[in-house]
Image (cartoon, grey):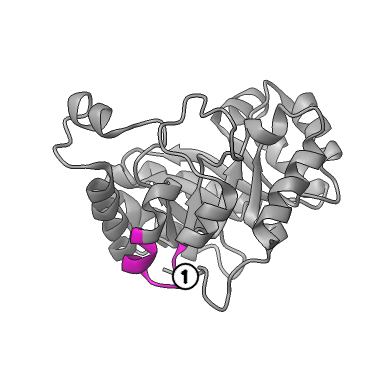
Amino acid sequence: MTGGNGTGSPAARDRLIVALDTPGLPAAEALVERLAGVVTHFKVGSALFTAAGPAAVEMVRRRGGRVFLDLKYHDIPATVAGAVEAAARLGVGLLTVHASGGAAMLRAAATAARAAGRDRPRIVAVTVLTSLDRAALQRELGVPVAVLGHAVHLAALAREAGCDGVVASPREAARLRAILGPEALIVTPGIRLAGGSADDQARIATPAVAVRAGADYLVVGRAITEAADPAAAAATILAELTA
């Protein structure tokens, strides 16, 4: 794995990724405009990409932003490799695959990314969704281990397959950092300010806690996008990271 929170750690401003979970392109573009000068990294997820397609990626890049394409590819290896190749042509910097897709799929994704050359996208493998807790993991998905144990297993699988890092909740970040080492990327959703609502997330933490645990990138959605002043909310999070 490459990247990480060692000597190549991203600057505080670059750690924050704002989720453009909007119903369409006009709302996403308005949000990017409101965050201009504060945030440079944006997540394009399945809702926005389904509504607007590659135009969402192009809009962020046209405005000088970096794109985290969070479509969580989970399919047969050839299909995932083709999707990664297409994402590379769009110029995204980070993209997600599901670690539970298996070793062959993960290797196909990593190989396709490397083939894109120097400016290739970095592949981060989703371990356990932050909306799941131990009860749901065991009762609904039939995984007979704790969340941390399953996340560790999937992270090791992703590392061995050549992925650049993982996506995990802040609660697993410290253990994954210890196992994966300083060069792996760790991306953490489930970020909330102290006293904020958990919404549909089961495993959350504040920005400072997540970074201390070893996270490189923090994905923040509603705490910023639903704020009366998104730029001020983002600035508050960035200030917490540099305190």
Q: Quadrant of residue 240?
A: bottom right
Query: Magenta stretch: residue 53 in it?
Result: no
The amino acid type, in three-letter code, at marker 1 is Thr
**Residue 204 showing in the rendered view:** yes
Is residue 51 found left or right of 235 in the rendered image?
Answer: left
Is residue 24 found left or right of 216 in the rendered image?
Answer: right
Is residue 101 found left or right of 56 in the rendered image?
Answer: left
Query: Magenta stretch: residue 180 in it?
Result: yes
Task: Tell me which residue sits at (32%, 57%) in the image.
Answer: 158
**Residue 20 showing in the rendered view:** no
Up-down relation of residue 28 to residue 155 (above or below): above
Give the image location of residue 159, x and y in percent. 33, 63
Task: Tell me which residue sits at (41%, 55%) in the image.
Answer: 173
Q: Quadrant of the N terminus?
A: bottom left
Name the residue at the bottom extreme: 7
159 vs 9, nearest the viewer? 9
Give the image location of residue 230, x and y in percent. 78, 35
Q: Which residue is mark 1?
A: 2
Give the image location of residue 9, x and y in percent. 58, 70
**Classed neighbour count for the residue bearing mark 1: other residues with Cα under 10 Å, few (<14), some (14–19), many (≥20):** some
Segment tinted magenta in the rendering: 175-185
